Image (cartoon, grey):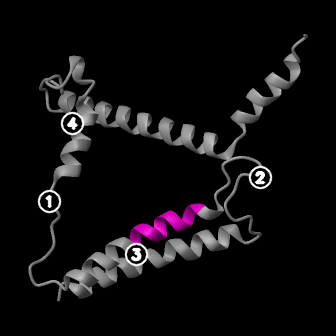
Amino acid sequence: MKKNVGNENAKENSKDSDPKHVIDSTTKLLNEGVAFLVLAECKVMAFVQRRKGPDVVGSFGLLQPLAEGLKLILKEPISPSSANFSLFRMALVATFMLSLVAWAVVPFDYGMVLSDSNIGLLYLFAISSLGVYGIIIVGRSSN
C-alpha cells in the first residue's frame, strides 16, 4: 500500500502554526534570552568593576542565571509592618494582572490574537494608564 506523503507534511506544518505551539516556543525563547542577558549583565558588571565575573556556578558561570532565579524565588516577601496586608497584596496582584491583560490585543501571528479589536492601541494605552492606581493603593495601604 502506498503512503500519502503530502498529508504527513501538511500535518507537520499545521503543528508549526498551532497557537499553543507558537506561544510555548516564544516563551521558551524569551526565557533563554533573559537568562543569557542576566549572565551578560553579570559579566559586564564584573568587567567594569575590574573583578572576575561569575564563574562559581557551573563552568564559565553558565548556571548563574539559574542560581539568580532560585535566589529570587526563595527571597522572603517584604511589606511594611504598619501596612494593611490584604490591601497591600491586592494592589500588587492588580498591578500584575493589568500587565497580563495588556497582552490581549498584541498579535502573535496573523490571526493569532486573543481579542481582535479595532481599538487595540487605545485599549493598550488605557490599560497601561491604570497601572498607576496600583502604586497609589500600595502607598495608601502602608499608612
- Image coords of residue 77 (percent x, y): 17, 64
Looking at the picture, which amino acid does disc 2 mark? Gly
32 vs 39, nearest the viewer: 32
Name the residue beneath numbered marker 2: 111
Label drawn at residue 94: 3
Mark 2 and mark 3: Cα distance apart in space? 29 Å
Relative to the observer, which residue lies in front, 21 or 80? 21
Residue, disc 1: 76
- Residue that extends furthest to the left in the rendered view of this protein: 81
**Residue at image x 13%, y 27%?**
50
Binning the other alpha carbons within 10 Å of mark 3 as few (below 14), some (14 to 19) or many (20 upward) gives some
Cα–Cα span, label 3 and label 4: 28 Å
Q: Which residue appears at 9% of the width and 79% of the height?
A: 81
- C-alpha span from label 1 to label 2: 42 Å
Residue of label 4: 67
Q: Which residues make up the magenta segment? A: 94-103
Q: Where in the figure is residue 41, as x and y percent of width and height?
A: 29, 35
Q: Amino acid at mark 3?
A: Ala
The label number, if any, that marks residue 28 in the structure image: none
Q: Earlier in the sequence, mark 1 or mark 3?
A: 1
Tell whether 39 sits left or right of 118: left
Q: Secondary structure at mark 3?
A: helix
